[in-house]
Image: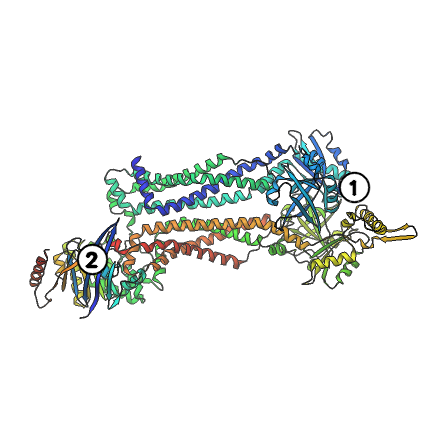
Amino acid sequence: MKAILKTEKLCKTFSNEGLQQHVIKNLDLEIMEKDFTVIMGSSGSGKSTLLYALSGMDKPTMGKVFFNDEDISDYSNDKLAVFRRDHCGFVFQSIYLLENMNVLDNILTGALLVQKNTPELVAKVKELLKKVGIDEPLWKKYPNQLSGGECQRVGIVRAVINEPQILFADEPTGALNSSSGQDVLDVFTELHKNGQSIVMVTHDLKTALRGSRVIYLRDGGIVGEHRMPDYGTDDNLKRRESLQGFLNEMGW
Amino acid sequence: MKKILRLSFANIKKHKKETFLLMILIMLGVVLLSAAVSAVTGIKKITPQMVEASGCYKNFVSIRQKNYSDRYLEFLKGNPDVESFDHTSFVTDIIKVRQQDEGDVLTDLSFVTVSGECRMESYEPDPDFATAEHPILLASSIREKLEVSEGDEFTISWDNKEFTFTVTGFYETGLWIYGSKAVVSEEDFVYLDNTMDDRYEMIGINTAEGADSKAVIAGFKAFAEEASVNDLSGSFYGVSYEETVSNNEINMSILSIIMIIMSAVIVIAIMIMIRFRIVSDIREQIVSIGVLEAIGYTSGQIAASYIAEYLLIALVSSLTGIAPAIAMAKGLLRNAALTVGYGGPLTAPMLPVFICTAAIILFIGITAFSRACSVRKYPPVMAFRKGIGTHSFKKTILPLEKTKGSVHVRLAVKDLFVNAKNHIGLTVCIMACTVLALTGFILGTFFGSPDRILNSVCGHELCDIRIETVGDIEPEAFAAELEGMDEVRQVLTPAVGIGVKAAFGNGAGKNSDASYELEVYDDYSKTSTIVLTEGRLPEHDNEVGVTVQSQKMIGAEKGDTITIEYGKVKKDYVITGVVNSAVNPITVYLTTAGFKRMNPAYSPSAFDIYLEEGADRKAFADLLRERYGKEIAEYKDNKTTGDTTEEKIRAVADKRMAEAMSEEGVSYMEYAICVGDRVITGSTSLMKIKTLTFERKEMEEIANMILVSFAGIAAIMMIVAGIVVILILSILMASTIRRQYKELGIMKGLGYTSRELKFQLAFRIVPVALLAVILGTVLSLLLIEVVNAYVCKVMISALTVVLLDIAILFYCFICAYISARRIKKISVYELISE
């Protein structure tokens, strides 16, 4: 497996009324292709900041971010936008569907930027929606007519429709109830099994269990890393124990 | 109250830039509206103020000197409707005044003597006046225009002549119906009288209280025509005080009225922007509104905070606008007063300024109130849910699954339809601005080009050189002789200075008493600057052409038969065509044969000479003088006595002959004078030219004078339209970005670049602007129709209008695109980490 994302001495500092807050400090990290990387840490440890720096949503203060060996840290905002549309998919905790658009339009808004054959694209969207359990009656509905879980599954379809090389997810189940959360995580697991590279931020153990690699952040730096036992060879309990042990070690 | 104001200030602080733009818009509206209304109010007082300050007569009658007789005054003596009257002679011409920077300023100036001026108004002679050499006392109203001061040399030129006065001072003149007025010495007046074309007798009349001054003037005219052996139709001009006041008010108010229209556009823009902003504010702050309601604020208090916010903005910007409004009102009043020759003290009425300011503040308050009340629709829980109104359950408009072509265009048009209601206001604003810009541009370019005026709307034939002849000249032979010269392309023989009356429907038509200038040519196909709007120019002796305005005055159409009266002779003519004439709007056109039906003895005495391309007009004029003698006035005014006895005798003899020819109608003279054994002989064979004028050149100068004001007004209209469009689109874009901050952020997250989103936002207004531009164009063309009906036919090229519309559309798009630059500042990260 080769590294799809790599950081070198990555720093992110926020200034507020003269006060400087160093959120990420000299962080070196490699994200492997087809890996399901989970970033964990306590509140304020810098996990979301790291996710957005990795995904080109935000620019680092210092250091470099390489995507497939290409330095994206000096990209202009517009170039980063093009980078995001071509290579990345995003699933947000707050879902962020466009409230004035129906399900299909929400997905097509991003998809039509990359894929120009509308009929083919629409067929693909419908197929994906069916796959994640959003059936035809819901396609013309507006976000406020759907449940949270349904919305997030629409969000996932929107994120993967352009077949991104990497999918970023920031607490994707944070706003969902337990049952909806599991449905959404099943979708992520399925995607990973099909070879999708995923980077996910979470502080939830059940969510983290779906990953193949767990990175633990504290005060803007990586303090630990854990490779999860593979699905299929190990049962869920074994994975849970393994992760639990790692997190205990990290003082979680 | 304190709580409400705190909320208002917080909102203002949050949207500083938008608030600032709105303040500029309000200030602009206050300045334009207050200044214009104040000026219009003040303008009504100028003429009475002028009469009171100068003690001048109120009603005036002018009669060409050659047609005047003291016998006419019998009508006024002992007339119970006439309180007082007096009369004086004056000469007038459009002259050039030399400026210090060597340029010339064209001005219409009348010259009177000291004694004459004392008869017309309460004028007190200046003691310095009598001692100065060639003194001139000028009306203070032309002081600024001519840039002269006391003691300066004042050099004027006309018809190739030049004279230098010394300015002894300035004075406030009363009413005067022929441009500005200047007082000169008796000797200089005699010189001007001999050399200038137009000498008149001015009769000032004050009517008794309750008397109808128009009827007095009409009676005076009828009496004079009865008493005269001459035809007075072209030389009698009477104007009552009421007409003067009304004409002055119209002339003075044009600019102010245009400003009122412009301010109305701005006020509409303000209303729409405020409504749009409040709606955006409420949508943006809906959760905060819910929170405020939850913690105990009433919806009335929240609505009041919005009203207070806009009242504060209106108050500050209106108060800031008062001082510039007063200054502008003063400027407008001064400008208006100068157009009627008043240079005395003026005060801009303050009350209209305050009333307009208060009205705008009130209007803004009402607008804010009408929108802010919608807060009441959102009780806390509904507000937390961001209002039911933000949830669309309607049918999806323009679904993206049907996208063909650019997704950006699709998204822009989709949003346009979703928010169609919000765009109605924008349509009205852009439409109003289009009307301003398009009307300004069309009128500015049409009347703003000297060539256009001269070649399309002059209504008067412009040759290179026109000579009027004296003495015994056979017109055909003389024209043929001129045409035989190498430099000459063609010679036409027009009639000059003839006035006629015209009536439709047995004299029962409109304005049957009005005097129309008559143009007469043998063959109109050889003329070049008499351009028709419809029909054709007269070809036969029973045909007549009329100008757009003459047609309106007469009340007849093409194909109608009208009666034309010259002297006491009336003949019927059929209207064959309508001529576009901005320069001589009250004119009728006859063929030589047609005119001879009324005046069989008519023989042309003027010759329009058209030179070959490249021929030098001045050199050719010198050649004419060499061949046919100097202009008759030059002989009359010849002050050179010569060195030898013979030269002295010849100069005196020439002067006497010139006087006899120009004043007594003598057609030919010879002299033989014996001095000792020598006989000095001479004749009038070298005195053929009465006047020589460069018609086209002179008209170019007059046209230029008209153009400056037109171009200025057109430029102001276009600038105001441009500023309003920039301001409204800036405010609109800022509000839209604020309202759709989240959506735009999400789209950025999905990979839309700032440039693509800017394009989408700007493209949303394109269909709106297109509709507005089309409606604005239709309205502009209707406005132009009004000009067509009352002034002259404005010829509009469809291509120009289309190109201008495209330019306006492009301008709107660019303004919107630039205004949408704030999108760049939307950070996806900030949005997500909120």
Q: Is residue B802 above or below residue B349?
A: below
Give the number of the disc on residue B229.
Answer: 1
Horizontal and vertical percent position of residue B383: 26, 45
Q: In the picture provided, is B360 more to the left or to the right than A30?
A: right
2 or 1: mark nearer the eye: 2
Q: Quadrant of the N terminus of chain B?
A: top left
Q: Chain of mark 2?
A: A
**Disc 2 marks which residue?**
A24
Horizontal and vertical percent position of residue B133: 71, 41
Q: Is residue B534 above or below residue B343?
A: below
Q: Look at 59% across and 41% down and name the residue there.
A: B338
Asked which colour scheme the image uses, the reply is rainbow
Give the number of the disc on residue B74.
Answer: none
Q: Are marks 2 and 1 on the same chain?
A: no
Mark yes or no: residue B2 visible. yes
Q: In the picture provided, is B475 more to the left or to the right than A182?
A: right
Horizontal and vertical percent position of residue B831: 26, 53
Horizontal and vertical percent position of residue B570: 74, 46
From the viewer's side, name the closer residue of A88 and B182. B182
Image quadrant where residue B213 sits: top right
